[in-house]
Amino acid sequence: MPAETITASPTEQIKLRGHVFYIKRDDRIDPLLSGNKYRKLYSLITMPAGHYRRIVSHGGSQSNAMLSIAALCHRKGWVFDYTSKPLPATLKSAPDGNLHMALSFGMRLHEVAHAQYDDAIRQLAGVTEPDTLFLPQGGADPLARSGITLLAGEIRAWLQQNKLESVNVVTPSGTGTTAYYLATALPEATVITAAMAGSETYLRAQMQMLGSIPENLRILSHERKYHFAQPYSALLEMYHELISAGIEFDLIYGAPMWHTLLLQMEQISGPVLYVHSGGLIGNETMLARYRHKGLL
């Protein structure tokens, strides 16, 4: 079903380590614009194609957001310019995963040396052409609010259907945009998250750029430091345990979020609704890293 005509994503149940969890299947919205990327890009998805000519953004070379923006621009007929730090030689000679797909959608990749990267991003953010939109890394922009508010409305309707007064809504965080706007739009729920792409201090700083952190937003601490998008045996085990429970999640955000959540379930009361953030296409390249490290 095209993303423009999507209805509310379904909610399913899984049992894991003696607990019942509800899963909001945002990963089923669209194969390329799934999970929180659909929510963050919702205002652009529903916007007339003539509103913009070009989107500029930046981030990692295997970013889920990069692929989603590339797919969106391809559908809209927009130019997509994406800035990243220099690619590893093997990836540059043989692009794979999200990068390969984004390039196939016409994304124009611009590599910038590490020393010049921050200056390059500041220049991108200062773009003034009226037909060009700058999207910060990961889609962390106030434009994301409308789609996440739509998600909050779907969760509220689900609560009413199931005669629940409140729920713990779980979503992993890179910049914290989804968790922040979801907590703002859904005050009757507790939104639980954890930092996946940096420290908790970094996550809080990113959220505070959007506004004061809502009181109903709870940030869990990991029991150990996990470097972003690196292979860990504990996360691979978590990935396979989730598949055995009936649903695949991504290795970069989903597996560490579940790992941290399950370790702290005794401190969480009430039903838990996990919002599936998609990103499953990226598992291909992550599993290759696990094989390269001899963990798979």
Image (spheres, grey):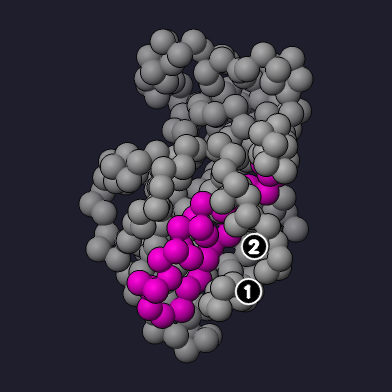
Contact (Cβ within 8 Å) of mark 2 with mark 1:
yes
**For the residue marked with disc 1, what is the amino acid?**
Ile
**In the image: residue 64, left or right of residue 204:** right
Where 11 falls versus 34 (above or below)? Answer: below
Residue 118 or 8: which is nearer the viewer?
Answer: 118
Can residue 293 be seen by looking at this rendering?
A: yes
The numbered disc on residue 14 is: 1
Residue 123 magenta-highlighted: no
Query: Percent position (x, y) of residue 112?
Result: 51, 12
Q: Quadrant of residue 202?
A: top left
The numbered disc on residue 242 is: 2
Mark 1: secondary structure: strand
- 2 or 1: mark nearer the eye: 2
Can residue 123 be seen by looking at this rendering?
A: no
Mark 2: secondary structure: helix
CA gap, disc 2 and disc 1: 9 Å
Quarter of the picture holding the N terminus: bottom right
Furthest residue in direction bottom, as rendered? 163
Where 277 falls versus 79 (above or below)? Answer: below
Quarter of the picture holding the C terminus: top right
The span shown in magenta is: 255-283
**For the residue marked with disc 2, what is the amino acid?**
Leu
Residue sitting at x 70%, y 36% = 294
Query: Percent position (x, y) of residue 89?
Result: 67, 13
Classify 10 Å Cα crowding around label 2: few (below 14), some (14-19), many (20 and above).
some
Residue 232 or 245: which is nearer the viewer?
Answer: 232
